[in-house]
Image (cartoon, rainbow, N blue to C red):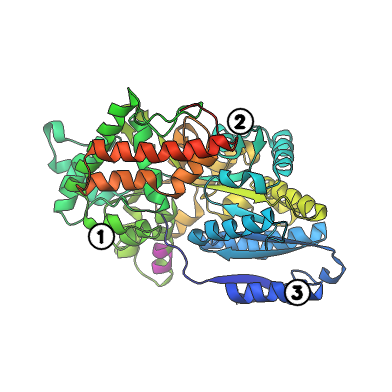
Amino acid sequence: MEQERKQDETWVQVAEGRWRRLTRRDFLKSAAAGAAAGSLGPLVLTERTRAQPVTLRILQWRHFVPPYDEWFNKVFAPKWGEKNGVRVVVENVGLAEIPAIAASEAARVAAGADPGHDMIQYLTPPATLERQVDTDAHREVVEELKRKVGPYIPLAEKSTYNPVTRRYFGVSDNFVPDPIHYRADLWRQVSARLTGDQRVPLLGPITWDDIRKAGRELKRMGHPVGLGLSQEIDTGMWLRALMYSWGTGEQDEAGNVILDVPPFRQRTLDALRFVKALYEETMFPGVFAWTAASNNEEFLAGRISIAANAISIARTAQTMAAAAIRRGENPNQSPAVQFARNTWITERAPRGPAGARGLEHVMGVYFIWRNRPRPVREAAKKLLIDLVLSYDPDVAAREGWPPGKFHASQAYDYPTFQNAISKQKRLAYLRDDPVAKAAGDRKDKLATIETAYEWAHNVGWPGPSSAAIDEVFNTWILNVMFARVAQGIDTPEQALDAAAAQIRRVFQKWREQGLVGGRR
C-alpha cells in the first residue's frame, strides 16, 4: 500500500487560526483531563466552544494523500462544527493502529463504558463489531443519502450491510480503487524484446499472465515485480483479486465456504501454483517481509517495476516532480519528472481465467458506537451525511468547506454514493488534473481509474463482507496459505486443506452467533 506518515500525531485547533500538534499520548491525556473537568480543555475547535454542549470525537487514519487531512482537520471539521454547534475533535493515527484501538473501545462499549471516541473510520469492513455499533443510525444515514444523491453502489452495500441480521454495521463514504502500477519505460523495453507466445502488450499488462511473462525479464533487468506475500492488508487484497479472477474465493453468495469444494478446489490449486511460479520467476524474498508501506517505498525508490496499489504511488511521484520543477529543474531532463511520467496505472484489474476482477484498495467505513448519548449520535449522523455531500465541489463551496472531499483527496477517495459527485465532474477533474499538470505529467493519465466501478469487488465477493470474512481477512489465513506454497513449505494441497479447515471454524463460530449465513 502507500507509505504511512510516521509521526504519531494529532492536530487540534486551539483558537481561530491557531493549531497545535499533539502526540497520541498527549491527546488522550488532554481528553481525559477535559472529561474530568467537564470540558476538553485545550481541545477546542471554535471560539463558540464554551456554549456548545455537544462534542464529537472522531478517530480516523492519517490519509495517504496529506492534503486531505489538511482539508478535513482544518477546513471541513471546524467549519462544519461552527455551523452545527458541535465541537469536533479529530485524532489521526496510522492505518495499522486502528483495529487494535477499535477492539479495545468495543470491549468498553460492551461493558457500558465510554469508549474514548464516538465514531471511527475503519479501512476494511468492520463486520465483527456489529453488536457494539449503532446499526439504526447507520441505516438512517444510508437511507437519507440514498434520498439525497441516489444509489449506494453494490460494493459498498456488500461491505456494510449484513443480510442475515438486515443491519448496517457501518456507512461507507468512499472506496479506493486498486489498479496495477508499472514502470512504463521498463515495460516498453521488455515489450520490444519479447516475441512469439511470450509477447506482452506495449501499453502495459492486461492479464496476470502478462505480468508473469514480462516479470521474468524485468527481474533480470534488476527491477522485479513487487507484490507482497506477508501478513498485511495489501497482500490480502491482491491475492483475493487474483483468486476471484481465477473463479474461486472464500465463500459463495450465500456464505458457504467454497475454496476447497469442487469445482472451486481445482481453481484454488491453480491459483496457488500460479502465485508460486510468479514468485519464483519474477519476485524476490523481500516480499515475505512486505508492510503496508512497501509498495510505495520500493516503487518510488526505483527498485521494483510493478505494484498493486491505490493511485497514491502516482500521486507521490507527481508531488516529487512538482517539487523538482519548483526548484528550477528542466522538466525534460529532471529525473523526478521523468519518473512521474513513466509511472502508469492499468486501465483495469489484471484478467485471469475467469475475468478481470479487482478489489478496493481500502474501504472507508465509518461506524458510530451504540452507547453514545443521543445528541452525539445525531451529530455523527449529520456529519457523515454532509461529508458525503461535500464530494461535490459546488456543494462544498456553497457550504463553506471547499474544495470538497473528491478534490481534497486528489481523486483518491472515490464515492460509494456514486452520484455524490457526478461522473461529469469526476472526469472534468481527472482529464484536466491539476496535480499532474503541476508535475509536468500528462494531465489525463489517471482518468482510467473511473473504470473501477466496473471491476472493483468487496472482500468476500460474491458474498457479503461478513464477520467471518472480517476475521479471515485480519488473521491473514489466505496470505499464509499462499506464502507457504510460494516458499515451498507446503504443497498446494496441504496449504489449501489447512486454510479451508481454519476458515470453516471461523465461519461456524460466527454462524452460531447468528451473524453469518450459509450451512457449510
Q: Nearer the viewer, mark 1 or mark 2?
A: 2
Dot 1: element: loop
User: Between 332 and 323, which is closer to the camera in this rendering?
Assistant: 323
From the image, give the main secondary structure of the stretch colored magenta.
helix
Q: Amino acid at mark 3?
A: Gly
Residue 361 visible at all? no
- Residue 311 image point, x, y percent: 43, 50
Q: Is 70 included in the stretch rendered in magenta? A: no
Task: Report the Cα–Cα distance between label 3 and label 1.
Answer: 48 Å
Against 162, residue 329 (above or below) is below
Residue linked to disc 1: 303
Dot 3: element: helix
Against 161, residue 429 (above or below) is below
Q: Is 321 included in the stretch rendered in magenta? A: yes
Q: Residue shown at 63%/59% (left/top)?
A: 105
Q: Residue shown at 35%/56% (left/top)?
A: 295
- Residue 121 image point, x, y percent: 60, 53
Quadrant holding the C terminus:
top left
- Residue 252 image point, x, y percent: 45, 27
Dot 2: element: loop
Q: Residue shown at 67%/48% (left/top)?
A: 133
Upstream in sequence: badge 3 or badge 2:
3
Q: Amino acid at mark 1?
A: Arg
Residue linked to disc 2: 163
Question: Label for residue 34?
Answer: 3
* Chain part drawn in magenta: 320-324
Quadrant holding the N terminus:
bottom left
